[in-house]
Amino acid sequence: ADMGVSVDTALVDALLKSAPRPEKAERSAEPATPVQVRRGSKTVSDWANEARAAAKSATTLDALADAIRAFDGSPLKSACEQAVIYDGVPGASLMVIGEGPGAEEDRRGLPFVGKAGQLLDKMLAAIGRSRGVNTFITNVNYWRPPGNRNPEADEIAVCRPFVDRMIELVQPKLIIAAGGVPAVSLLGSKEGIMKLRGNEYAYSTPDGFKAPMIPILHPAYLLRRPQDKSRAWRDLMLIEKRLAELA
Ligand code: URA
């Protein structure tokens, strides 16, 4: 109801019962790194290798956050205020991965604290989740792109080793990919978010940590297209059900 959807519980139950079994496609965890792109004296692939080494040697979230702040492989770093790394509870069973910081996040140094973040908080609250108690929130890119454009593939690729390491350190039972950018990049998919959302995928980091991943529509998109909130509601119901099964 907080999301502006009037809920017919009988209909939701019927939809959940008739929903196809979650898709269990195994996806490659390796991003398609655009190897030839040069950034200063190094290629994107060099920077991704540097990120991988730094991420691997981080054995705590604090150490990983320090490694991300010290990393110079993203061209976005010099144009924004600060790295936005994570919020919420380390070790939470639910991890939300979004696209990257906007203006408010850049200013405050925390993910999902602008208008879209407020809607995300309401969506999570609808399934008994909050960043203060039982949810961990991060992004596939840590630095705000100028003008809030989407991050480019190579900007996401250099962050990916940190994202995978963060997943390994948090050990979530379930991951939500919030929006097309994280869903498509993490799953290495050719499909768009409208096809991916509401399905379950088996995500695996290169070092072998596995967790189910369910993509949802991005809350910023839902603010622009409130008529799609019922789809998000259905996806949240699936997430709540799967979290209960995985507990
Ligand atoms: N949108 C995102 O995807 N992430 C944020 O942190 C903020 C807005």
Image: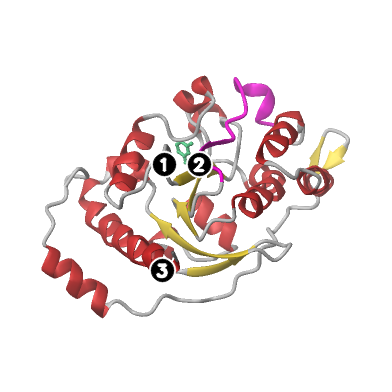
Judged from the image, the secondary structure of the residue bearing numbered disc 1 is: loop
Ligand 1 within 8 Å of the CB at mark 3: no
Label pair 1/2, CB-CB below 8 angstroms:
yes
Per the image, the residue denoted by label 3 is: 199
Q: Which mark is residue 230?
A: none
Label 3 and label 1: CA atoms lie apart by 26 Å
Judged from the image, the secondary structure of the residue bearing numbered disc 2 is: loop
Residue 107 against residue 231 in the figure, above or below: above
Q: 10 Å neighbourhood of mark 1: few (<14), some, or many (≥20)?
A: few
Q: Where is residue 64 in the image (x, y as percent from the top left)?
A: 71, 39
Looking at the image, is mark 1 or mark 2 earlier in the sequence?
2
**Taking 90 as reference, is 200 left or right?**
left
Q: Which of marks 2 and 3 is in front?
A: 2
Q: Quadrant of residue 37?
A: top right
Q: Where is residue 20 in the image (x, y as percent from the top left)?
A: 34, 79
Q: In which quarter of the image is residue 232?
A: bottom left
Q: Which kind of residue does numbered mark 3 sit on?
A: Asn
- Asked if one can make out residue 29 in the rendered structure from this viewpoint, the answer is yes
Of the pair 37 and 53, the residue shown nearer to us: 53
